[in-house]
């Protein structure tokens, strides 16, 4: 009995140590007070801080706007909570890039990335491009699907995943979990599995918070999305 108690105690210590070690690996991407570590690219949507949240606000006649981490990330687990106006489209970029000079999209091996017609994809200077975890409050309900911003378009929609479509909460906080390792990208929305993609075009890049352009639609002017509790856990690939 004494030996069993000792083993149980030892096991509890090991479990506690592993739990603490996992907690220590989480890194906060937002301190709740400033936008230190972030830079805006693309359009001129407004970003501000309010009540411990990053708030993105749409403006007229500007393109898609992105608030981007200054650091790049490759293999990781990322979690975030958001609340979006039903009229506003948005998304979260992962493993994304933006170049000062125009060029053609290339994969990790330096080979050209082509569109559905087999044509090389041209990337304008200053264009944010890469994987996007969609935020879609429309009736289509493809939130947590994966879209290839500025390149190939939809990679994983949610037409055949009704459970994930139903998991989105309108006018309320939603939570995403994203796991990237090697050529695997997986997403969850409010704990429900959403997208499962195998694609190795871009193995590393920044994370960004998108406010989609609204053109000159005055009904969408000033619509907002809020993000909070942004954290990342880099994965050991050794």
Image: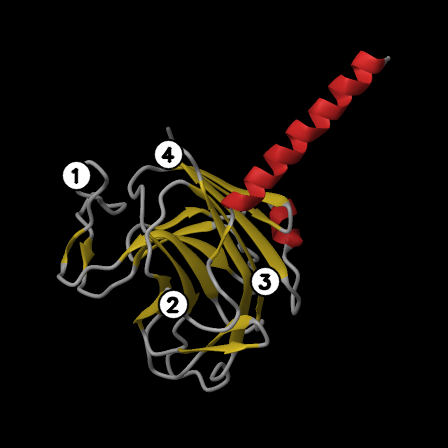
What residue sits right under mark 3 in the picture?
139
Q: Nearer the viewer, mark 1 or mark 4?
A: 4
Query: Disc 4 or 3, which lies upstream in sequence?
Result: 3
Q: Name the disc covering residue 9, or none.
A: none
Query: Disc 1 or 3, which lies upstream in sequence?
Result: 1
CA–CA distance between discs 2 and 4?
A: 25 Å
CA–CA distance between discs 2 and 1?
A: 28 Å
Q: Nearer the viewer, mark 2 or mark 1?
A: 2
Q: Is residue 216 left or right of residue 28?
A: left
Front residue of 20/121: it is 20
What residue sits right under mark 2 in the picture?
67
Q: Nearer the viewer, mark 2 or mark 3?
A: 2
Query: Disc 2 or 1, which lies upstream in sequence?
Result: 2
**Which residue lies at the image location 56% right of the left edge and 52% below the top edge?**
176
Q: Residues within 10 Å of mark 4 (few under 14, many from 20)?
A: some
Q: Name the disc covering residue 111, or none.
A: 1
Give the position of the N terminus as an image quadrant.
top right
Query: Disc 1 or 4, which lies upstream in sequence?
Result: 1
Question: In the displayed structure, would residue 18 be above or below residue 67?
Answer: above
Q: Name the disc covering residue 182, or none.
A: 4
Which element type, helix, strand or loop, lies under badge 4? loop
CA–CA distance between discs 1 and 4?
A: 18 Å
Query: Disc 2 or 3, which lies upstream in sequence?
Result: 2
Front residue of 235/20: it is 20
Name the spot of residue 212 as percent of width and height, x first: 41, 70
Query: Disc 2 or 4, which lies upstream in sequence?
Result: 2
Name the spot of residue 132 as percent of width and height, x first: 41, 54
Front residue of 88/238: it is 238
Q: Residues within 10 Å of mark 1 (few under 14, many from 20)?
A: few
Q: Is residue 128 visible in this depiction of the protein?
A: yes
């Amino acid at each position: 009995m004494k030996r069993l108690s000792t083993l149980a105690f030892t096991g509890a210590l090991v479990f506690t140590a592993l739990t603490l070690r996992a907690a220590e690996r989480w890194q906060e991407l937002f301190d709740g007070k400033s936008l230190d570590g972030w830079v805006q690219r693309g359009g001129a949507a407004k970003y501000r801080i309010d009540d411990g949240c990053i708030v993105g606000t749409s403006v007229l006649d500007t393109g898609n706007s992105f608030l981007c981490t200054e650091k790049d990330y490759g293999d990781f687990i990322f979690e975030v909570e958001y609340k979006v106006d039903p009229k506003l489209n948005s998304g979260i970029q992962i493993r994304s890039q933006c170049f000062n000079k125009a060029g053609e999209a290339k994969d990790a091996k330096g080979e050209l990335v082509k569109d559905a017609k087999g044509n090389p994809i041209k990337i304008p200077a200053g264009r944010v491009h890469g994987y996007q975890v969609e935020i879609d409050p429309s009736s289509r309900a493809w939130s947590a699907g994966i879209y290839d911003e500025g390149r190939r378009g939809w990679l994983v929609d949610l037409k055949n995943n009704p459970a994930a479509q139903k998991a989105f909460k309108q006018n309320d906080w939603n939570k995403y979990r994203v796991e990237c390792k090697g050529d695997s990208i997986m997403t969850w929305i409010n704990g429900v599995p959403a997208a499962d993609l195998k694609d190795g075009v871009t193995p590393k890049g920044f994370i960004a918070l998108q406010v989609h352009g609204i053109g000159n639609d005055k009904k969408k002017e000033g619509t907002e999305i809020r993000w909070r509790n942004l954290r990342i856990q880099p994965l050991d690939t050794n």
